[in-house]
Image (cartoon, rainbow, N blue to C red):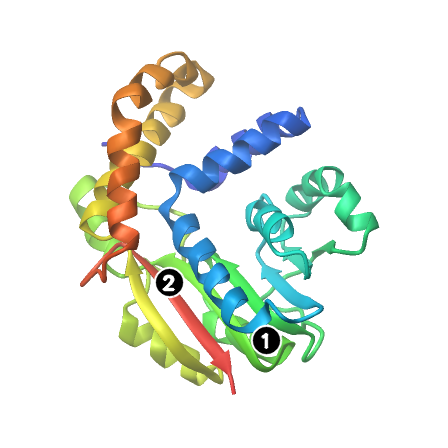
Amino acid sequence: MSKIAYDPTKDKFARWIRRSRLLRTLFYKTLDLFFLRSWYVRSALRQYYRSRFATESRWDILDAGSGFGQYDRFLLRNFPNAVIHAVDVKEDYLQDCRPYFDRQIKRGRIRFETHDLVTDDLPPESFDLALCVDVLEHIEDDIGVMRRIRKALRPGGIFIMHSPSHYSEEDAGEDEFFVDEHARAGYSKEELSDKMQKAGLEPVSLRYSYGAWGHRAWVMLIKIPMLWFTRFGMLTLLWLPFYYLFTLLPGLAMMWLDLRQDNFRGTGILGIGRKS
């Protein structure tokens, strides 16, 4: 099976969705529907909003590695007191986001800033929650990045991350599949707990995602179409609707099952920490 380089593929989508606001909205909705990590992250955000932040007049959030702005859209639409500082090392991604979020920028609910998490300091004790989704696996000095994020959190602040787990390396070996942009294959619960503690964060919850059900759904709904896009480009759109006609509902059912069970192992990991 062919290898996938995710960054070039993501850049192709970025060029495509910048053409119109409607395309970008559809892209966000597609990411939320098809990517199980989004289900896990949104579930965690809802949980902490209900338990801690629903009664606050302002909820300051750091989106550390905001990418396409997928979670920024979710936060702004679902949590009326959320105020977001979205940072990413890729200025072109941020530049694409600014027109889409123009109204919220003018209202002071979100700002986008070029920022290198490895070298640049963040404003100290400024955020109630920090989100870092599929970022740390790309960074060699992940503990240093978590330390910077910890410093930016207020006392009691929450850190939510998602990354591939160390089990994803087994999947890479079985399918001759590897993401070249990664600094590591992924994290085990023990390794992630240890690194959080070294960064000064108290591990609250460590949970494997993409277990048996979720992994099957990922192969069916994401991996196979991504391989087609890598090989055939936008021509894939011609037959993709027919493919999803038979695979979408079974795939979504598998994702639902994955989210609602405690996976003994999985190719993704959701980590939640707290600044004491």
Q: Residues within 10 Å of mark 1 (few under 14, many from 20)?
A: many
- Could you tell whether 83 is left or right of 67 in the image? right
Which residue is rendered at x = 16% and y = 44% of the image?
174
Q: Which residue position is annotated with label 1?
A: 148
Dot 1: element: helix
Which numbered dot is residue 270?
2
Where, by quadrant of the figure, is residue 18 drawn? Answer: top right
Q: Is residue 130 visible?
A: yes
Camera-near label (2 vs 1) is 2
- What amino acid is at disc 1? Arg
Q: Residues within 10 Å of mark 2 (few under 14, many from 20)?
A: many
Indicate the position of residue 137 as horizontal and vertical percent values: 42, 59
Q: Is residue 251 above or below residue 194?
A: above
Q: Is residue 14 above or below residue 165?
A: above
Indicate the position of residue 14 as horizontal and vertical percent values: 58, 33
Cα–Cα span, label 2 and label 1: 19 Å
Dot 2: element: strand
